[in-house]
Image: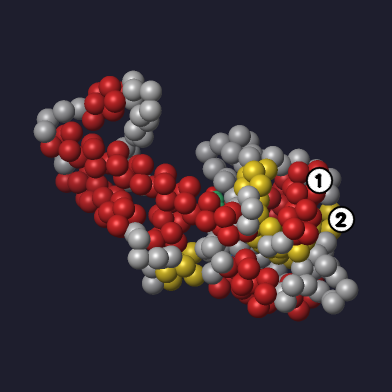
Amino acid sequence: MKFCVIGLGEIGFVAAKYISDKGLDVWGYDISLAAVKRAKEAGITNAVSSWNDLPLADVYLICVYSGLKDEVPNLSPIFDVCEKIKRTIKSSDHPLVSIESTIVPGLCRKIFQDIFEDRVRLVHVPHRYWREKPTKHGVKQLRVIGGVNAESLQAGLKLYSDVLGIPLHIVSSIEVAEMSKIAENAYRYIQIAFAEELRMICEGVGLKFDEVRDACNTKWNIAILEARDGIGGHCLQKDAKYLASLTKFKSLIESALHIDEQYRKWLKHRS
Ligand SMILES: NC(=O)c1ccc[n+]([C@@H]2O[C@H](COP(=O)([O-])OP(=O)(O)OC[C@H]3O[C@@H](n4cnc5c(N)ncnc54)[C@H](O)[C@@H]3O)[C@@H](O)[C@H]2O)c1
């Protein structure tokens, strides 16, 4: 079985390394020469920056960047690499494509129909990687999987569970998998924003936030988070914005984004 990991940034690199460490045949592709160099130095010798240097693979793991442009989801790298896969495969091939990058609900099905025209099996297995604890919260941790159809889901389960040994939470549609990723990150973002606002309120009335938080957290159903230096990393904020971009229902997310901005300014001026 030949794997191709597309995008060798933070999560693509760890995914390729995980597969390579299992002794499996893995290729890597990235448009960044630096990402390719790093992968090669880490033992992923088949890392390339030219698409034409890749062999036909049985499994394509898509781990490319997905970001924001003018505050709305920019998913063009995903379309770009799916177009490349489509041009590579022949009509008799039926590879498994797994999108691991964070996306928005509906994207996988659109790509399956409009780009692949049903010629691949397609699953979405979003990443939950956390660089602070790469072993416990790395490639191998409980992950959500959804397939674009039953055949895709079966192929995805076989690959992730049997071949890669990754525990899975199966959902009934690929859209649920897509939504779960951005919802979990937006939820985390809002929880931290609450802690930030509570800290500003506590200090505003002359109380120590930590002591109030400790007191609240003695209750069985309360777990207020810490309020540190602002909500870090780019994923939580980006994914909250992905969720907010879907419908008109976004008041809580917008408030949380505003609170974090306010909190950062407050931190600067309080001492
Ligand atoms: N980093 C994390 O902790 C983390 C956790 C969970 C989910 N994610 C998600 O994973 C995805 C990737 O995140 P990352 O942190 O690895 O990003 P990254 O910026 O570290 O890496 C992305 C890589 O994609 C490459 N790339 C961009 N466009 C490309 C194209 N058209 N063809 C080939 N390569 C291309 C870039 O050169 C880069 O090396 C994002 O959707 C992100 O939201 C990241």
Mark identifier at residue 188 = none
The percent coordinates of residue 243 (x first, y second) are: 43, 59
Instruction: Determine whether, in the image, residue 109 is placed left or right of residue 261.
Output: right
Q: Which residue is found at the position 11% from the left and 33% from the top?
A: 205
Q: CA distance from mark 2 to mark 1?
A: 10 Å
Amino acid type assigned to the residue bearing label 2 in the image: Met
The spot of residue 178 in percent (x, y) is 56, 57
List the residue tagged with mark 2: 1
Mark nearer the N terminus (2 vs 1): 2
Q: Quadrant of the N terminus?
A: bottom right
- Image-quadrant location for residue 65: bottom right
Question: Would you say the residues marked 2 and 1 are in contact, meaning their CB atoms lie under 8 Å apart?
Answer: yes
Q: Circle 1: is it few (<14), some (14-19), or many (20+) Cα within 10 Å?
A: some
- Is there any visible trace of residue 224 in the rendered image? yes
- In this view of the protein, which residue sits in the foreground, 54 or 164? 164
| The residue at label 2 has a CB less than 8 Å from ligand 1 | no
Which residue is painted at 20% across and 27% down in the image?
Answer: 208
For ligand 1, give the image quadrant.
Answer: bottom right
Viewer can see residue 83: no
The residue under label 1 is: 163
Left or right: 222 in relation to 4:
left
Residue 253's quadrant in the figure?
bottom left
Q: Secondary structure at mark 1?
A: helix
Q: Position of residue 122 (x, y in %)?
A: 71, 63
The local crowd at label 2, few if under 14, some if 14 to 19, many if 20 or more residues have their Cα within 10 Å, is few
Viewer-proximal residue among 225 and 171: 171
Q: Where is residue 29 shown, x and y percent of the image?
A: 71, 64
- Residue plotted at (56% across, 66% down): 106
Up the image or down, 30 lies above or below 224; here it is below
Assign the C terminus to one quadrant of the image: top left
* Callout count: 2
What is the three-letter code of the residue carrying label 1?
A: Val
